[in-house]
Image (cartoon, rainbow, N blue to C red):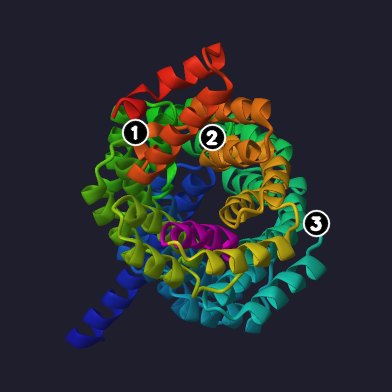
């Protein structure tokens, strides 16, 4: 006969066996539902099985997957069930892979991700995605050589998978090596990875290489893939914007806005819209979009810079412009190329305020950056400042330097013409103006006046009148200084001696009536 304790012991053992048997049955029910993609019902069966004492690596992997695909993804639960799976079978490499992938994809814990991905390899589990995640993690830890090695291994072992090509393309892309990235991104697309992020990168890469036709083609592919994706229209808008084709750029930007583009994820669009509206002389909308750009949590130097330009050039509020240019510099610490534009326009602002010493100091600060950052524009601005300060010899040195770099630099040629006129070298001045005439209207309308002055001094009266007539059409008189107005008035008086009652001269006099009658 069994004693009381022995009877209880045998009863408990039998109860556990029955419970385990029932738990296994519940697991199988859950597995069937899981395979039918009825994940919520499957998960409940798995939980009941676990409650009855059933444990298996497969069940916990299924549970982790259900937590992963849930709309309210709970990463902690995903990791919890993966840990349970590993505890059930510590030699199962796939579980380690999933944990590494989770750390990489959702937690940005790249060191831990690498640790578990390498454990997966150690336990004889390999796949293309494993090498993709290794490459991604190494790249995020700035271990570029290891990242490229992992991507190359993936391509070598799994040449028919897009994963390795995508990994390698991403590495080059995020290093701004777009020409190198492009072949791998294209191969990734060819092998079946046709989704918006890849198409975006391909389009953007083509834009950086100035192949706008291809850039537009891939932006359109994004739209074809998902007509409700605001990022697709954002990308298409930028393709047009970079070609200065503002109407289709604006159309696509407005569509992206309508579809709810998140500026915190895709910045810069609203500031570009502000510029477009300013160029269309709609300062009200320009201000609206500039304010909208600055209303988001994430804003960069360009957003402040754009507002500064709008305040200075559009709204003529120099105090506000100064404030925003200073904010732009403050937020541009890691963007050397972006700072250059700010230094140029801040110097222009100081010139408008007739603070020439500050204008020169500002442009010199910009010139301290490495020469690869558009320094020719800074040199042009420095020439403009020095010219206003009557430091002509320094101007000429910089002009000579720019012409040595590029003999057909139209801006430098017109500046040279202005300086040569000051030296009374009228022949050279005229020659320089002729060479730069193609863009003189946009570069410096005031140069037309000096061209006219030089021609008059050479006795070429008809040509002088012709050039001064052009000058009168292009000049924005609100920017003229007092000494400029004196020169204009004096020149008109000289022309009148040679062309009394000339209809062209009368038109010029009408345009400059306020100056003449002062």
Residue 160's disc number: 3
Q: In the image, what residue occupies the spot 57% across and 65% down?
A: 373
Residue 393's disc number: none
Give neighbour class at mark 1: few <14, some 14-19, many 20+ (Cα, 10 Å). many
Question: Dots 3 and 2: beta carbons under 8 Å?
Answer: no
Please identify the quarter of the rendering in which residue 94 is found. Answer: bottom right
User: Front-most of 486 and 53?
Assistant: 486
The residue identified by callout 2 is: 237
Q: CA distance from mark 3 to mark 2?
A: 34 Å
Residue 330 drawn at (x, y percent): 31, 66
Q: Secondary structure at mark 1?
A: helix
Question: Dots 3 and 1: beta carbons under 8 Å?
Answer: no
Q: Secondary structure at mark 3?
A: loop
Q: CA distance from mark 1 to mark 2?
A: 17 Å
Of mark 3 and mark 1, the one earlier in the sequence is: 3
Of mark 1 and mark 2, the one earlier in the sequence is: 2
Q: Is residue 378 in the magenta section? A: yes
Residue 468 drawn at (x, y percent): 56, 29
The residue identified by callout 1 is: 286
Q: Is residue 460 in the magenta section? A: no
Which stretch is magenta? 373-389
Would you say the magenta stretch is mainly helix, strand or loop? helix
Residue 48 shows in the view: no
Point out the frontmost of discs 3 and 2: 2
């Amino acid at each position: 006969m069994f004693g009381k304790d022995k009877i209880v012991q045998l009863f408990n053992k039998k109860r556990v066996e029955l419970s385990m048997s029932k738990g296994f049955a519940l697991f199988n029910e859950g597995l069937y539902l899981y395979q039918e993609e009825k994940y919520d019902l499957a998960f409940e069966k798995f939980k009941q099985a676990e409650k009855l004492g059933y444990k298996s690596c497969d069940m916990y992997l299924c549970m982790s997957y259900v937590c992963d695909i849930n709309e309210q993804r709970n990463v902690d639960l995903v990791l919890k069930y993966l840990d349970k799976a590993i505890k059930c079978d510590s030699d199962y490499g796939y579980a380690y892979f999933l944990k590494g992938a989770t750390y990489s994809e959702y937690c940005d814990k790249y060191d831990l991700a690498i640790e578990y991905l390498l454990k997966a390899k150690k336990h004889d589990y390999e796949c293309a995605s494993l090498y993709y995640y290794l490459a991604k993690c190494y790249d995020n830890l700035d271990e570029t050589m290891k990242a490229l090695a992992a991507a190359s291994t993936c391509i070598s072992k799994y040449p028919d998978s897009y994963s390795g090509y995508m990994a390698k393309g991403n590495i080059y892309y995020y290093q701004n090596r777009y020409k190198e990235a492009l072949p791998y991104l294209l191969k990734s697309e060819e092998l079946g990875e046709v989704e918006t992020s890849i198409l975006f990168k391909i389009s953007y890469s083509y834009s950086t290489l100035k192949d706008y036709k291809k850039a537009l083609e891939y932006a359109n592919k994004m739209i074809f893939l998902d007509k409700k994706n605001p990022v697709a229209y954002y990308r298409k808008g930028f393709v047009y914007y970079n070609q200065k084709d503002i109407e289709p750029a604006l159309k696509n930007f407005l569509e992206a806005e309508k579809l709810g583009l998140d500026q915190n994820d895709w910045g810069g669009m609203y500031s570009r819209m502000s510029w477009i509206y300013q160029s269309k002389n709609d300062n009200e909308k320009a201000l609206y979009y500039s304010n909208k750009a600055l209303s988001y949590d994430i804003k960069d130097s360009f957003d402040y810079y754009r507002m500064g330009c709008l305040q200075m050039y559009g709204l003529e509020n120099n105090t506000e412009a100064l404030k925003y240019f200073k904010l732009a510099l403050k937020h541009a610490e890691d963007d050397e190329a972006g700072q250059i534009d700010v230094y140029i326009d801040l110097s222009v602002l100081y010139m408008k305020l007739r603070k020439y010493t500050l204008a020169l100091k500002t442009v010199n600060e910009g010139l301290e950056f490495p020469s690869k950052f558009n320094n020719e524009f800074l040199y042009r601005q420095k020439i403009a400042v020095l010219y206003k300060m009557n430091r002509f010899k320094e101007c000429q040195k910089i002009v000579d330097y720019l012409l040595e770099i590029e003999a057909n630099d139209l801006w430098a040629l017109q500046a040279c013409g202005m300086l040569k006129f000051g030296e009374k070298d009228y022949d050279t001045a005229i020659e320089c103006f002729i060479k730069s005439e193609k863009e003189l209207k946009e570069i410096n309308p005031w140069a037309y006046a000096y061209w006219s002055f030089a021609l008059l001094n050479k006795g070429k009266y008809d040509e002088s009148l012709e050039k001064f007539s052009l000058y009168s059409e292009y000049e924005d008189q609100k920017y003229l200084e007092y000494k400029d107005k004196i020169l204009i008035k004096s020149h008109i008086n000289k022309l009148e001696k040679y062309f009394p009652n000339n209809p062209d001269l009368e038109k010029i006099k009408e345009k400059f009536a306020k100056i003449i009658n002062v």
